[in-house]
Image (spheres, grey):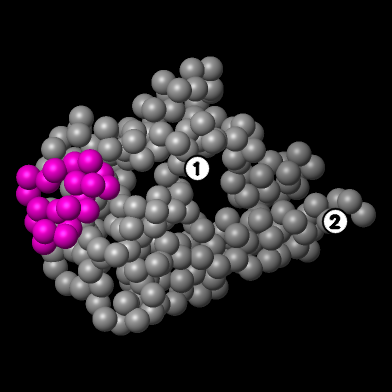
């Protein structure tokens, strides 16, 4: 308990009032109750609000769509997992033995969820001002590194725009399989453009991630096709 407290103070520069909130925040559902799913939900909402405000104040001439793409990049699973890994969140996760053996403490989705849960705990424990300060510090170095908004369009959006520019019908996305337990599912999706006889698979820890991968694979096929 003292180790968790010291880590929270030194890493997040925050002194918890109710440490039980943070013990729950680092507890994966596989390890029993209370776990971090409800706190993750709350942290996700707070994170989106604070990053939206940061971006609004930082990029004063950016349009709504550009701000949305910036925010999606900042709070993506990849981004949050990288931040969580750098903070050492994996060292404090509470996981079922099976999850530990399978490397759950390094799994990006688990790390990202735990970080959001910690932010949710800070919000409940210290209020909006406290969690805003933590989030601003966590993302301070990432804001200046954001590329032009036009470069941040996700593969699904890029594929849709490419097809629409040629008057081609939008792609279909079909879930081919879902594997794993509810807290650690793995999706296999196929993206298809029937009118061009193109299709490609994609995999990921969520349906959205799998669809994005599949869309990227079809987009690469499309570029090759139109180059010929």
- From the viewer's perspective, tell me whether residue 13 is left or right of residue 112: left
The C terminus lies in quadrant: bottom right
Relative to 182, does residue 167 appear above or below in the rendering? above
Give the residue drawn at x 68%, y 66%. Answer: 200
Residue for badge 2: 225
Relative to 226, does residue 179 appear above or below in the rendering? below
Give the residue drawn at x 86%, y 51%. Answer: 226
Give the residue drawn at x 72%, y 54%. Answer: 219
Residue 99 visible to an observer of this rendering: yes
Relative to 114, does residue 181 appear above or below in the rendering? below
Give the residue drawn at x 49%, y 22%. Answer: 59
Foreground residue among 55 and 188: 55
SS at circle 1: helix
In primary-sequence order, the first of circles 1 and 2 is 1
Residue for badge 1: 73
State which region is magenta: 1-20
Relative to 224, does residue 43 appear above or below in the rendering? above
Residue 14 painted magenta:
yes
Determine the CA span between mark 1 and mark 2.
Answer: 29 Å
Position of residue 21 measured from the top left corner of the image (x, y, whole percent)? 13, 53
- From the viewer's perspective, tell me whether residue 96 is left or right of residue 216: left
Position of residue 120 measured from the top left corner of the image (x, y, whole percent)? 22, 46
Q: Residues within 10 Å of mark 1 (few under 14, many from 20)?
A: many
Quarter of the rendering containing residue 15: top left
């Amino acid at each position: 308990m003292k180790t968790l407290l010291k880590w929270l103070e030194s890493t997040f520069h925050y002194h918890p009032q109710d440490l039980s909130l943070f013990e729950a925040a680092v507890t994966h559902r596989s390890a029993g109750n209370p776990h971090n799913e409800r706190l993750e939900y709350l942290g996700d909402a707070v994170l989106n609000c604070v990053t939206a405000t940061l971006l609004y104040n930082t990029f004063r001439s950016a349009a709504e769509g550009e701000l949305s793409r910036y925010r999606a990049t900042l709070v993506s699973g990849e981004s949050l997992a990288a931040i969580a890994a750098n903070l050492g969140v994996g060292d404090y996760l509470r996981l079922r033995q099976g999850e530990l053996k399978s490397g759950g403490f390094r799994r990006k989705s688990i790390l990202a969820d735990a970080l959001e849960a910690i932010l949710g705990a800070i919000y409940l424990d210290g209020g909006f001002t406290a969690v805003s300060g933590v989030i601003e510090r966590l993302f301070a170095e990432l804001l200046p590194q954001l590329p032009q908004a036009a470069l941040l369009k996700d593969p699904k959006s890029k594929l849709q725009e490419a097809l629409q520019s040629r008057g081609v019908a939008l792609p279909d996305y079909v879930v081919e399989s879902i594997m794993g337990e509810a807290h650690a599912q793995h999706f296999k999706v196929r993206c298809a453009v029937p009118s061009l006889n193109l299709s490609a698979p994609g995999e990921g820890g969520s349906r959205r991630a799998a669809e994005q991968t599949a869309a990227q694979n079809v987009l690469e096929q499309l570029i090759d096709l139109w180059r010929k």
